[in-house]
Image (cartoon, helix red, strand yellow):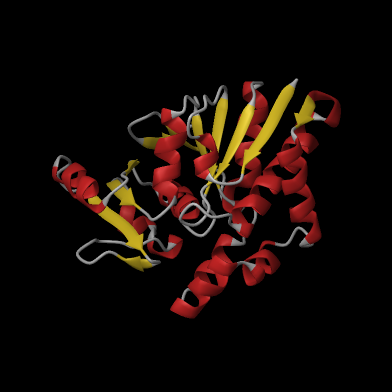
Amino acid sequence: MLRVEVLATPDMSEGREIRGTGVVIDVLRASSSIVQALSSGCQEVIPACTEEEAREIRDRYPGAIIAGERGGMRIEGFDLGNSPLEYSPASVAGKVVVMTTSNGTKAIIGASRAGAHPVLICSFLNLRAVARACAGRAQDVTIVCSGSHGEFSLEDFACAGALAAALVDMAGSASVVLEESAREAMDLFSKHDRDPEVIFEESQHGQYLKALGFAEDLKHCAKVDLLHVVPVYDGGVITTA
Protein backbone atom coordinates (compact mmCIF):
# COMPACT_ATOMS: atom_id res chain seq x y z
CA MET A 1 0.00 0.00 0.00
CA LEU A 2 1.12 3.54 -0.85
CA ARG A 3 0.45 5.96 2.01
CA VAL A 4 0.16 9.65 1.06
CA GLU A 5 0.34 12.53 3.54
CA VAL A 6 0.42 16.28 2.93
CA LEU A 7 2.20 18.75 5.19
CA ALA A 8 0.56 22.13 4.61
CA THR A 9 3.70 24.06 5.65
CA PRO A 10 7.39 23.13 6.06
CA ASP A 11 7.15 23.79 9.81
CA MET A 12 5.06 20.63 10.14
CA SER A 13 8.15 18.56 9.29
CA GLU A 14 10.20 20.00 12.16
CA GLY A 15 10.91 17.59 14.97
CA ARG A 16 9.66 14.56 13.05
CA GLU A 17 11.13 11.99 10.73
CA ILE A 18 9.91 11.74 7.16
CA ARG A 19 10.17 8.17 5.96
CA GLY A 20 10.03 7.24 2.30
CA THR A 21 9.70 9.67 -0.58
CA GLY A 22 9.45 13.38 0.08
CA VAL A 23 7.93 15.69 -2.51
CA VAL A 24 8.42 19.45 -2.17
CA ILE A 25 6.02 21.86 -3.87
CA ASP A 26 6.52 25.61 -4.33
CA VAL A 27 4.39 26.26 -7.39
CA LEU A 28 4.88 30.05 -7.34
CA ARG A 29 7.66 29.79 -8.18
CA ALA A 30 10.74 27.89 -7.01
CA SER A 31 9.71 24.35 -7.91
CA SER A 32 8.40 25.54 -11.28
CA SER A 33 11.70 27.32 -11.97
CA ILE A 34 13.77 24.28 -10.95
CA VAL A 35 11.73 22.03 -13.23
CA GLN A 36 12.11 24.53 -16.06
CA ALA A 37 15.86 24.89 -15.50
CA LEU A 38 16.52 21.16 -15.66
CA SER A 39 14.23 20.78 -18.64
CA SER A 40 16.28 23.49 -20.36
CA GLY A 41 19.48 21.47 -19.94
CA CYS A 42 20.82 22.87 -16.69
CA GLN A 43 23.57 20.59 -15.34
CA GLU A 44 22.33 20.79 -11.75
CA VAL A 45 20.65 23.12 -9.28
CA ILE A 46 22.21 23.67 -5.86
CA PRO A 47 19.71 25.03 -3.30
CA ALA A 48 20.85 27.40 -0.58
CA CYS A 49 19.00 28.82 2.42
CA THR A 50 20.59 32.28 2.44
CA GLU A 51 22.05 34.80 0.02
CA GLU A 52 25.45 34.50 1.69
CA GLU A 53 25.45 30.72 1.38
CA ALA A 54 24.45 30.98 -2.29
CA ARG A 55 27.36 33.32 -3.01
CA GLU A 56 29.81 31.06 -1.21
CA ILE A 57 28.64 28.03 -3.18
CA ARG A 58 28.78 29.96 -6.46
CA ASP A 59 32.39 30.88 -5.79
CA ARG A 60 33.27 27.16 -5.59
CA TYR A 61 31.86 26.46 -9.05
CA PRO A 62 33.59 28.50 -11.78
CA GLY A 63 31.05 29.57 -14.38
CA ALA A 64 28.06 28.85 -12.16
CA ILE A 65 24.95 31.01 -12.32
CA ILE A 66 23.54 32.46 -9.12
CA ALA A 67 19.78 32.89 -8.93
CA GLY A 68 17.11 33.78 -6.44
CA GLU A 69 14.60 36.20 -5.02
CA ARG A 70 13.48 37.95 -1.92
CA GLY A 71 10.01 39.43 -1.83
CA GLY A 72 9.44 38.04 -5.31
CA MET A 73 12.15 40.19 -6.91
CA ARG A 74 15.59 39.19 -8.17
CA ILE A 75 18.29 39.65 -5.55
CA GLU A 76 20.64 42.50 -6.42
CA GLY A 77 23.77 41.22 -8.16
CA PHE A 78 22.28 37.80 -9.00
CA ASP A 79 22.19 36.52 -12.57
CA LEU A 80 18.59 35.31 -12.51
CA GLY A 81 15.53 35.75 -10.35
CA ASN A 82 12.79 33.23 -9.69
CA SER A 83 10.79 33.47 -12.90
CA PRO A 84 10.65 30.13 -14.76
CA LEU A 85 10.62 32.09 -18.01
CA GLU A 86 14.21 33.18 -17.28
CA TYR A 87 15.47 29.59 -17.27
CA SER A 88 15.75 29.12 -21.02
CA PRO A 89 18.32 26.85 -22.70
CA ALA A 90 20.22 29.95 -23.76
CA SER A 91 20.55 30.99 -20.12
CA VAL A 92 21.19 27.73 -18.27
CA ALA A 93 22.04 24.83 -20.61
CA GLY A 94 25.11 22.96 -19.36
CA LYS A 95 25.52 25.23 -16.35
CA VAL A 96 25.33 24.87 -12.59
CA VAL A 97 22.63 27.05 -11.04
CA VAL A 98 22.94 28.03 -7.38
CA MET A 99 19.51 29.10 -6.14
CA THR A 100 18.07 30.65 -2.99
CA THR A 101 14.43 31.64 -2.61
CA SER A 102 12.23 32.86 0.21
CA ASN A 103 10.51 29.52 0.73
CA GLY A 104 11.16 26.73 -1.77
CA THR A 105 14.88 26.08 -1.40
CA LYS A 106 14.55 26.07 2.40
CA ALA A 107 11.71 23.53 2.20
CA ILE A 108 13.78 21.25 -0.05
CA ILE A 109 16.74 21.26 2.31
CA GLY A 110 14.43 20.85 5.31
CA ALA A 111 12.68 17.80 3.86
CA SER A 112 16.03 16.13 3.26
CA ARG A 113 17.22 16.89 6.78
CA ALA A 114 13.98 15.38 8.13
CA GLY A 115 14.94 12.09 6.52
CA ALA A 116 13.00 12.04 3.26
CA HIS A 117 14.78 9.99 0.61
CA PRO A 118 14.59 10.74 -2.16
CA VAL A 119 13.33 14.33 -2.24
CA LEU A 120 11.49 15.09 -5.48
CA ILE A 121 10.48 18.56 -6.68
CA CYS A 122 6.99 18.96 -8.08
CA SER A 123 4.93 21.65 -9.79
CA PHE A 124 1.94 21.63 -12.10
CA LEU A 125 4.46 21.66 -14.97
CA ASN A 126 5.68 18.12 -14.19
CA LEU A 127 2.79 16.77 -12.11
CA ARG A 128 2.26 13.35 -13.69
CA ALA A 129 5.99 12.74 -14.17
CA VAL A 130 6.42 13.07 -10.40
CA ALA A 131 3.33 10.93 -9.76
CA ARG A 132 4.80 8.16 -11.94
CA ALA A 133 8.10 8.37 -10.09
CA CYS A 134 6.34 8.09 -6.72
CA ALA A 135 4.12 5.22 -7.84
CA GLY A 136 7.13 3.37 -9.22
CA ARG A 137 8.98 3.52 -5.90
CA ALA A 138 6.09 1.93 -4.00
CA GLN A 139 6.96 3.63 -0.71
CA ASP A 140 5.19 6.16 1.50
CA VAL A 141 4.92 9.67 0.08
CA THR A 142 5.05 12.84 2.19
CA ILE A 143 4.21 15.98 0.23
CA VAL A 144 5.69 19.13 1.77
CA CYS A 145 4.10 22.44 0.78
CA SER A 146 6.57 25.33 0.91
CA GLY A 147 3.90 27.87 1.81
CA SER A 148 4.75 31.53 2.24
CA HIS A 149 7.01 32.49 5.16
CA GLY A 150 5.62 29.66 7.25
CA GLU A 151 2.00 30.37 6.35
CA PHE A 152 -0.46 28.22 4.41
CA SER A 153 -0.36 28.65 0.62
CA LEU A 154 -3.48 27.88 -1.41
CA GLU A 155 -1.61 27.05 -4.62
CA ASP A 156 0.85 24.64 -3.00
CA PHE A 157 -1.85 22.75 -1.09
CA ALA A 158 -4.00 22.49 -4.22
CA CYS A 159 -1.04 21.17 -6.23
CA ALA A 160 -0.46 18.61 -3.49
CA GLY A 161 -4.07 17.55 -3.96
CA ALA A 162 -3.56 17.27 -7.70
CA LEU A 163 -0.52 15.05 -7.10
CA ALA A 164 -2.45 12.85 -4.66
CA ALA A 165 -5.26 12.50 -7.22
CA ALA A 166 -2.74 11.55 -9.92
CA LEU A 167 -1.26 8.88 -7.64
CA VAL A 168 -4.70 7.38 -7.03
CA ASP A 169 -5.35 7.43 -10.76
CA MET A 170 -2.08 5.66 -11.55
CA ALA A 171 -1.82 3.17 -8.69
CA GLY A 172 -5.54 2.57 -8.15
CA SER A 173 -7.63 3.50 -5.12
CA ALA A 174 -7.17 0.04 -3.64
CA SER A 175 -3.38 0.52 -3.56
CA VAL A 176 -3.29 4.05 -2.08
CA VAL A 177 -4.03 5.10 1.49
CA LEU A 178 -4.80 8.80 1.71
CA GLU A 179 -4.28 10.51 5.05
CA GLU A 180 -6.89 13.11 5.96
CA SER A 181 -4.53 15.89 4.88
CA ALA A 182 -4.25 14.38 1.39
CA ARG A 183 -8.03 14.09 1.10
CA GLU A 184 -8.43 17.71 2.14
CA ALA A 185 -5.90 18.78 -0.49
CA MET A 186 -7.71 16.78 -3.18
CA ASP A 187 -11.02 18.37 -2.17
CA LEU A 188 -9.49 21.84 -2.39
CA PHE A 189 -8.15 21.12 -5.87
CA SER A 190 -11.56 19.85 -6.99
CA LYS A 191 -13.37 22.88 -5.54
CA HIS A 192 -11.29 25.08 -7.83
CA ASP A 193 -12.39 23.11 -10.91
CA ARG A 194 -8.97 21.43 -11.07
CA ASP A 195 -7.81 24.60 -12.83
CA PRO A 196 -4.45 26.08 -11.71
CA GLU A 197 -5.25 29.47 -13.25
CA VAL A 198 -8.38 29.73 -11.10
CA ILE A 199 -6.32 28.76 -8.07
CA PHE A 200 -3.63 31.34 -8.82
CA GLU A 201 -6.21 34.09 -9.29
CA GLU A 202 -7.63 33.35 -5.82
CA SER A 203 -4.32 32.83 -4.01
CA GLN A 204 -2.77 35.63 -2.05
CA HIS A 205 0.69 35.00 -3.48
CA GLY A 206 -0.66 34.76 -7.02
CA GLN A 207 -2.26 38.17 -6.64
CA TYR A 208 0.95 39.54 -5.17
CA LEU A 209 3.08 38.28 -8.07
CA LYS A 210 0.59 39.64 -10.56
CA ALA A 211 0.82 43.06 -8.92
CA LEU A 212 4.63 42.87 -9.27
CA GLY A 213 4.24 42.32 -13.02
CA PHE A 214 4.62 38.53 -13.18
CA ALA A 215 1.29 37.69 -14.80
CA GLU A 216 3.07 35.69 -17.51
CA ASP A 217 4.72 33.57 -14.83
CA LEU A 218 1.29 32.61 -13.51
CA LYS A 219 0.18 31.54 -16.97
CA HIS A 220 3.31 29.44 -17.44
CA CYS A 221 3.19 27.82 -14.00
CA ALA A 222 -0.44 26.82 -14.68
CA LYS A 223 0.49 24.60 -17.64
CA VAL A 224 -0.15 21.08 -16.41
CA ASP A 225 2.23 18.33 -17.58
CA LEU A 226 4.08 20.61 -19.98
CA LEU A 227 7.43 19.12 -18.91
CA HIS A 228 8.52 15.60 -18.04
CA VAL A 229 11.62 15.93 -15.88
CA VAL A 230 11.68 14.74 -12.25
CA PRO A 231 14.13 16.80 -10.19
CA VAL A 232 15.75 14.84 -7.35
CA TYR A 233 17.63 16.37 -4.42
CA ASP A 234 20.33 14.12 -2.95
CA GLY A 235 21.21 16.32 0.00
CA GLY A 236 23.63 18.42 -2.02
CA VAL A 237 22.45 19.01 -5.57
CA ILE A 238 19.28 18.70 -7.60
CA THR A 239 19.52 16.68 -10.82
CA THR A 240 17.05 14.76 -12.97
CA ALA A 241 15.96 11.26 -12.01
Compared across the picture, whether 2 is left or right of 64 comes to right
Identified at 55% across, 64% down, the residue is 220
| Vertical relation: 224 (above or below) 145 | below
Q: Position of residue 50 (x, y in %)?
A: 28, 49
Q: Position of residue 175 (x, y in %)?
A: 80, 24
Of 162 and 10, which appears nearest the observer? 10
Q: Quadrant of residue 188?
A: bottom right
Q: Position of residue 83 (x, y in %)?
A: 42, 63
* Residue 229 visible (yes or no): no
Outermost front residue: 15
Q: Quadrant of the N terminus?
A: top right
Identified at 25% across, 61% down, the residue is 79
Of 85 and 94, which appears nearest the observer? 85
* Residue 11 visible (yes or no): yes
Q: Position of residue 72 (x, y in %)?
A: 40, 66
| Vertical relation: 26 (above or below) 131 | below
Q: Quadrant of residue 177?
A: top right
Compared across the picture, whether 39 is left or right of 8 comes to left
Of 228 and 183, which appears nearest the observer? 183
Of 145 and 166, which appears nearest the observer? 145
Identified at 41% across, 51% down, the residue is 37
| Vertical relation: 194 (above or below) 18 | below
